[in-house]
Image: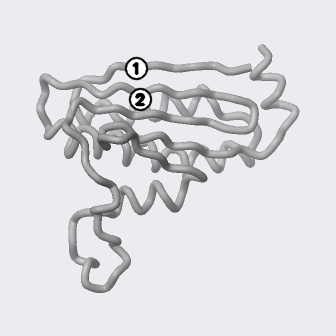
Amino acid sequence: MERKLVFELPNDLRCIEETVDFVVSRCSTCEEVARKLQLNFRVSLMEALSNAMIYGNGRNPSKRVRVEVFLRVGSVTARVTDEGPGFDPRGVPDPTVPSNLLEDRGRGLFLMRKLMDEVHFNDCGNCVTLILYLPPSDRIANEASA
């Protein structure tokens, strides 16, 4: 069984922490899963939201960010879509290359790719899908069927 959470957020960085807290509170289960959600999912979702608001929507307060979270037995998926023109994620420099260490770009995308099991962008680059696989648990299965 799947649960879905959908939000339309104003393009306001102050909304990020509260939104992420709410999402994580709705999908935390056993201790091992909770640890993965508290670090991997939380950091990745915060990065995706801030990138959407800052870079995608260009800090434009009239634009919005759509967040869709799918809670399934064995995984949690978040899709973050901004109203910007998009970008090519292949063009973002690797922040671990010595010549890029002082650059301001690429760290958030790097973190998302390292912390999540899958990271996908739509063709125009204004939507990122983050997938985190969760260890099996009877408690997860029971919550998903409730």
Q: Tell me: 100 left or right of 143.
A: left
Where disc 1 sits, the SS reads strand
**Furthest residue to the right?**
138
Foreground label between 2 and 1: 1
Please say if 123 is above or below 70. Answer: below
Q: Amino acid at mark 1?
A: Phe
- Residues 39 and 69: in front is 69
Residue 135 pos. (x, y %): 77, 46
Q: CA distance from mark 2 to mark 1?
A: 9 Å
- Helix or strand or loop: what does disc 2 sit on? helix
Look at 57% across and 43% down and name the residue there: 131
Against 80, is 98 above or below? below
Q: Along the horizontal axis of the image, is 104 left or right of 95?
A: left
Q: Residue under label 2, please give it.
A: 19
Residue 58's spot in the image, x, y percent? Answer: 14, 40
Q: Residue furthest bottom?
A: 98
Q: Is residue 19 left or right of residue 22?
A: left
For marks 2 and 1 on the same chain, the one whose residue lies earlier in the sequence: 1
The image quadrant of residue 107 is bottom left
Q: Quadrant of the C terminus?
A: top right
Q: Which residue is mark 1?
A: 7
Amino acid carrying label 2: it is Thr
Location of residue 56 in the rendering, given as x and y in whole percent from the top left corner: 22, 41
The residue under the point 69% across, 29% down is 72
Q: What residue do we see at 87% from left, 33% from top?
A: 138
Task: Evaluate if marks 2 and 1 touch, with contact meaning CB atoms under 8 Å apart.
Answer: yes
How many C-alpha atoms fall within 10 Å of the one at disc 1: few (<14), some, or many (≥20)?
few
Foreground: 44 or 130? 130
